[in-house]
Amino acid sequence: METVEDTISTGAYWDPDLWELARAAYVADLDNDPNAPGAFIGWIHQAIELHAALGVDDRARLRTEGSSSVVGAGRRGFNRHHPLRASTRSALEQAIVEDRRAGGVVLSRSAFLREAVVAAVDAARGRAGGELTPILGRLPNHPVRS
């Protein structure tokens, strides 16, 4: 019998540019990554888990190098609450504590989620050959894969 893991509502501040890039990256991964999750929230979980698993030094390197994803062009953002699995939320919080202890980087849960999504967008852009196609309208709950 399969057990269902508890989820914890986790708020995140999104700027509209990053939200649109994340949606485009998720859909691109459906076509370019056979291991991509089949739902957008799963893609967010994967982004957080992969970012947390990098470790302190690799996350610091990514912060120093910056991202090819230019976001935050001054448009007003919005808050969204995401139901994160307890294990994903725990990994996120553990990584935040490790970064603070190792180098004085103090991030909120929302800021860590943003970093994770930016890294995932950059990776998806690479898998897609450098371009992400903007997604118009609502995403289906479980879109068809390629």
Image (cartoon, rainbow, N blue to C red):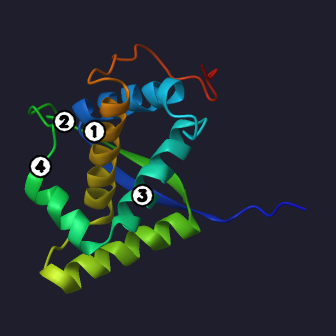
**Within-10-Å neighbours for mark 2: few <14, some 14–19, many 20+:** some
The residue indicated by pointer 2 is 69
Above or below for 90 versus 131 = below
Residue closer to the observer: 43 or 58: 58
The quarter in which the C terminus is drawn is: top right
Which of label 2 and label 1 is nearer to you?
1
Q: Secondary structure at mark 2?
A: loop
- Single out the residue that lies furthest toward the right: 1
Q: Of marks 4 and 1, which one's residue comes earlier in the chain?
A: 4
**Within-10-Å neighbours for mark 3: few <14, some 14–19, many 20+:** some
Residue closer to the observer: 61 or 83: 61
Q: CA distance from mark 2 to mark 4?
A: 9 Å
Q: Of marks 3 and 4, which one's residue comes earlier in the chain?
A: 3
Q: CA distance from mark 3 to mark 4?
A: 17 Å
The residue indicated by pointer 4 is 66
Residue closer to the observer: 141 or 10: 141
**Within-10-Å neighbours for mark 4: few <14, some 14–19, many 20+:** few
In percent of the image, x 34 and y 55: which residue is there? Answer: 113
Above or below for 43 versus 9 = above
Above or below for 4 versus 77 = below
Residue closer to the observer: 74 or 52: 52
The amino acid type of the residue labelled 2 equals Ser
State how many labels appear: 4
